[in-house]
Amino acid sequence: MSRTGRPRTTRNAPRPHPRSFWADHPRLLGALLVSFASALIAAQVAMKVTTHRALCATPVFLFYGLWALVVGAPKDPSTGETAGWAAVGGWLAGLLGMIASIVIATMLD
């Protein structure tokens, strides 16, 4: 206790990590990514122009966005963190999108 009667606080005490808006609303992020990927596809079809960069990014946005939209971010009850299977699934959805991007890029060349 300090002289004022209040408990002392340490200056090096760990502070809680601030969470971002998207960490609290993963399904909203998924909906945004899916709508962005759909807009990219619609723009490509409407303009009848194929740009490799947009088409290579679109499957990643689409697969990861669908995963985030469907699954969200379930919590592990024992730790309070995101469940391991959900995190692994998100990485696999992104990887599947990258593989689809490579396939699309090789088909366009």
Image: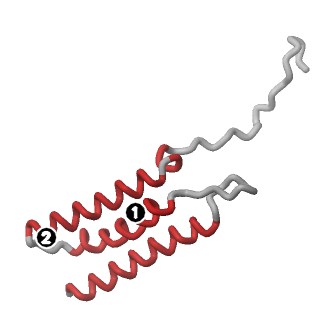
- In terms of secondary structure, where does tag 1 sit? helix
The residue positioned 13% from the left and 70% from the top of the image is: 45
Q: Could you tell whether 45 is left or right of 96 in the image?
A: left
Q: Quadrant of the N terminus?
A: top right
Q: Quadrant of the C terminus?
A: bottom left
- Which residue reaches farthest top? 4
- Which residue reaches farthest front? 70
N-term mark: 1 or 2:
2
Q: Give the class, few, some or many, for how many residues have Cα within 10 Å of label 2's Cα (few <14, many ≥20).
A: few
**Looking at the image, residue 18 lies above or below residue 56:** above
Residue 31 screen position, x and y as percent: 37, 56
Q: Could you tell whether 2 is left or right of 23 in the image?
A: right
* Quarter of the rendering containing residue 27: bottom left
Residue 106 screen position, x and y as percent: 27, 87
**Looking at the image, residue 69 lies above or below residue 22:** below
The residue positioned 55% from the left and 57% from the top of the image is: 73
- The residue where tag 2 is placed is 45
The residue positioned 15% from the left and 64% from the top of the image is: 43
Q: Give the class, few, some or many, for how many residues have Cα within 10 Å of label 1's Cα (few <14, many ≥20).
A: many
The residue positioned 75% from the left and 56% from the top of the image is: 78
Q: Give the CA distance from mark 1 to mark 2.
A: 21 Å
**Looking at the image, residue 18 lies above or below residue 37:** above
Q: Amino acid at mark 1?
A: Gly
- The residue where tag 1 is placed is 65
Q: Amino acid at mark 2?
A: Val
Q: Could you tell whether 59 is left or right of 24 in the image?
A: left
- In terms of secondary structure, where does tag 2 sit? helix
* Quarter of the rendering containing residue 18: top right
User: Which of the colour schemes (rainbow, by chain, secondary structure, one colour) is used?
Assistant: secondary structure
Residue 33 screen position, x and y as percent: 35, 59
Q: Could you tell whether 89 is left or right of 66 in the image?
A: right
Residue 37 screen position, x and y as percent: 29, 64
